[in-house]
Image (spheres, helix red, strand yellow):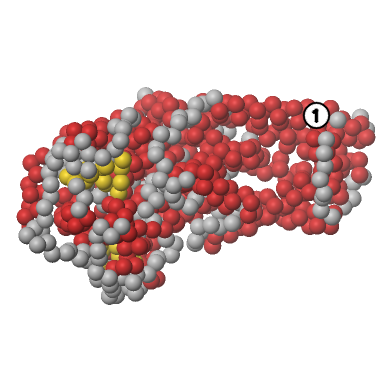
């Protein structure tokens, strides 16, 4: 029964975009060598091509002559209930949808979205790891996968505003930009909230947070439940429309940017005239247009490196802005890891893995690649623009006892802000 | 049936029938993909999709599809990069720039083109054959390839290998008489042509889809594909 649901979903998901790419796959296995989970564990089942195997079978057996023939001759198997359990483990605990594999594929197949298509089918069949499902349900019920309800959100914002002495405008009608934070920032990195508020204030941007659209993360996208994905997106867009803003700015969160910026217009009706930006791009823009000034060399001690987040750099395009900022903040201390930028190795904590306890082993194994990279440049500090990566880094360096300080880039920018004294 | 007759049959009616199956089969495959529906991309672009597509092809076709673009991946699977690249180079050079093959193209298309001297083609063909053997062994020993290789992949390997090895033996006049070798080569080619639409050997067509998608997806994000 559940297999049927998964198969129907696979079939529904198989448009020309997906099918033509499945047809292009020559099963050369080169994608495996780009996958941090395969590299870290040497488990062939974790090779990206294997991750979309159920979708390939469903597509071939339903749509192609060769696929039906192979099935009839017993050369290929139909997708079974056991298969779904197997791929639930593979696709949720050993894939962060980082899409690095697509860069190494000689055919240029965009594997990430195809693997996400498998998650959509698994989700329809109810084959989602329990803790991820719980977190998603919590986001449906109280508005945050970490269980931050309206009151908790309000008091955290107030607390940050008081403790860091920073003005955070709430529900300001007619502001230009609506800033949406993540629960991770609200609960674990409140300094990020203060930092982003300081940057926005210093830039002179007219901005606000919304008490209705207060959660930017989208666990529906992780899970592959597109109805929930749309629900969470709609909450943010509705709040933006209500406040009459022109821009929605995603804070240090990768997949939220992926969902709002790159996914939403293709899966739902999005309001006209509201664009989606990311703090990484915004900071770069503020700096190059002179709307904020930074103290040059503010972090120029030790060795500082930058971690490229899959959803913000490789899949988000904000590759140069963080570097432009770091070259001001740490002109001598800043050193690039290799490989980096669009080829950067994922932290291992994205795609929901950090909220799935069964993924812990893989997550830490993959993080060892990051440790290697940091050691090679002798990093004492590492910066990033994604709180999910940051959570994984904080967790990872603690787990392995590595002596590297982990920073959110916004926080460094806020600390280095040159604030011109206003005459009152 | 004499070898002479077999040769005439495999070069004539069978070859034409095989070509027909190939063309009709591939047309069917293409049309069924196109009919699956293509949702319009409504995401506002940050970079240029066209530039992304151009870069995607520059990377993939004009230089060499198997250049290890991503740092650190080559060392993990060098046979696939080297043998995979050399195989495609040797194969394409032979079937496009080899004089006998060009003459076949000319008879089909009505126009020809300059070709490479036989000794060069001969070496390229030999390289392609050795590369195929390396790929065969690689498929046997690489753990990822062991997992993803099924009967279809082995059948494909043989069906591609037979025309290559028979053609090579034929040009060197080894083992059998010329009629026998030419017949075997033509039979192998006919089999290949018939088999392509049913198999993943057809990837040379779908390559253009995936390369384009890749370029569009990265280009619209302003990222080098």
Q: Quadrant of the N terminus of chain A?
A: top left
| A300 versus B192 height, above or below | below
Against B72, is B169 above or below?
A: above
Q: At which x and y percent is residue B15?
A: 81, 31
Viewer-nearest residue: B139 or B206: B206
Judge left or right: residue A55 versus residue A27. Answer: left
Tell me, yes or no, if residue A200 can be seen here. yes
Residue occupying image coordinates x 80% and y 57%: B120
Q: Which residue is drawn at 11% across and 52% down?
A: A167
From this viewpoint, is residue A7 visible? no
Is residue B186 rendered to the left or right of residue A366?
Answer: right
Q: Is residue A118 above or below residue B172?
A: above
**Residue B137 percent location from the top left of the image:** 64, 53
**Which chain's residue wears label 1?**
B
State the image coordinates of residue B220 (x, y, percent, origin top left): 44, 44
Quadrant in the picture for the C terminus of chain A? bottom left
Q: Is residue B54 above or below residue A120?
A: below
Front one among B189 and A320? A320
Task: Identify residue for label 1.
Answer: B16
Q: Which of B185 and A394 is in front in this view?
A: A394
| Kind of element beneath mark 1 | helix
Residue lying at 71% horizontally and 40% vertically, measured from the top left: B159
Toward which corner of the image does residue A302 lie, by quadrant?
bottom left
Give the image location of residue A257, x and y in percent.
Answer: 31, 45
Q: In percent of the image, x 30 and y 49: which residue is there?
A: A278
């Amino acid at each position: 029964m559940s297999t049927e649901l998964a198969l129907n979903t696979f079939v529904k998901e198989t448009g020309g975009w997906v099918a033509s790419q499945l047809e292009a796959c020559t099963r050369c296995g080169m994608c495996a060598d780009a996958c941090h989970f395969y590299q870290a564990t040497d488990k062939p089942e974790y090779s990206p091509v294997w991750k979309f195997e159920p979708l390939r079978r469903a597509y071939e057996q339903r749509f192609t002559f060769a696929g039906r023939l192979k099935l009839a001759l017993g050369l290929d198997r139909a997708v079974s209930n056991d298969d779904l359990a197997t791929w639930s483990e593979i696709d949720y605990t050993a894939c962060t949808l980082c899409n690095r594999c697509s860069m190494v594929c000689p055919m240029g197949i965009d594997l990430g979205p195809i693997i996400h298509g498998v998650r959509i089918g698994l989700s329809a069949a109810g084959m989602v790891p329990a803790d991820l499902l719980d977190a998603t349900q919590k986001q449906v019920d109280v508005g945050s996968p970490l269980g931050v309800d309206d009151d908790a959100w309000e008091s955290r914002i107030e607390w940050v505003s008081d403790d860091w002495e920073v003005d955070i405008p709430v529900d300001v009608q007619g502001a230009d930009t609506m800033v949406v934070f993540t629960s991770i920032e609200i609960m674990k990195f409140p300094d990020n909230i203060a930092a982003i508020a300081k940057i926005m204030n210093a830039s002179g941007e007219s901005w606000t947070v919304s008490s209705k659209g207060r959660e930017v993360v989208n666990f529906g996208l992780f899970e592959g439940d597109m109805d929930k994905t749309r629900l969470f997106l709609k909450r943010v867009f509705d709040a933006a429309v209500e406040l009459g803003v022109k821009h929605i700015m995603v804070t240090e969160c990768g997949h939220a940017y992926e969902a709002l910026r790159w996914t939403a217009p293709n899966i739902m009706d999005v309001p006209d005239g509201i664009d989606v930006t990311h703090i990484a791009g915004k900071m770069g823009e503020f700096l190059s247009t002179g709307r904020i000034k930074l103290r040059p060399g503010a972090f120029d001690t030790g060795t500082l490196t930058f971690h490229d987040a899959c959803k913000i750099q490789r899949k988000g395009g904000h590759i140069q802005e963080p570097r432009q900022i770091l070259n001001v903040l740490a002109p001598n201390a800043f050193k690039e890891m290799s490989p980096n930028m669009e080829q950067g190795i994922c932290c291992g904590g994205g795609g929901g893995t950090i909220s799935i306890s069964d993924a812990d082993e893989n997550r830490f194994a993959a993080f060892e690649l990051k440790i290697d990279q940091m050691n090679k440049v002798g990093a004492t500090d590492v910066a990033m623009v994604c709180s999910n990566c940051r959570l994984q880094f904080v967790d990872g360096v603690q787990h392995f006892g590595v002596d590297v300080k982990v920073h959110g880039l916004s926080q460094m920018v806020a600390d280095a802000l040159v604030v011109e004294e206003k005459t009152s | 049936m004499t070898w002479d007759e077999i040769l005439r049959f495999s070069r004539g009616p069978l070859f034409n029938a095989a070509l027909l199956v190939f063309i009709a089969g591939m047309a069917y495959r293409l049309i069924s993909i196109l009919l699956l529906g293509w949702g319009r991309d409504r995401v506002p672009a940050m970079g240029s999709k066209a530039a992304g597509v151009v870069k995607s092809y520059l990377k993939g076709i004009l230089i060499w599809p198997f250049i290890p673009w991503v740092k650190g991946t080559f060392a993990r699977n060098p046979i696939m990069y080297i043998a995979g690249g050399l195989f495609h180079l040797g194969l394409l050079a032979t079937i496009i720039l080899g004089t006998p093959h060009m003459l076949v193209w000319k008879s089909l298309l009505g126009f020809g083109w300059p070709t490479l001297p036989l000794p060069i083609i001969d070496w390229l063909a030999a390289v392609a054959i050795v590369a195929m053997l390396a790929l065969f062994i690689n498929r046997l020993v690489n753990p990822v390839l062991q997992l993803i290789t099924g009967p279809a992949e082995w059948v494909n390997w043989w069906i591609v290998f037979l025309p290559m090895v028979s053609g090579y033996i034929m040009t060197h006049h080894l083992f059998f008489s010329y009629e026998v070798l030419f017949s075997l080569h033509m039979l192998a080619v006919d089999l290949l042509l018939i088999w392509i639409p049913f198999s993943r050997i057809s990837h040379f067509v779908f390559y253009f889809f995936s390369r384009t998608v890749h370029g569009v997806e990265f280009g619209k994000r302003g990222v080098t594909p």
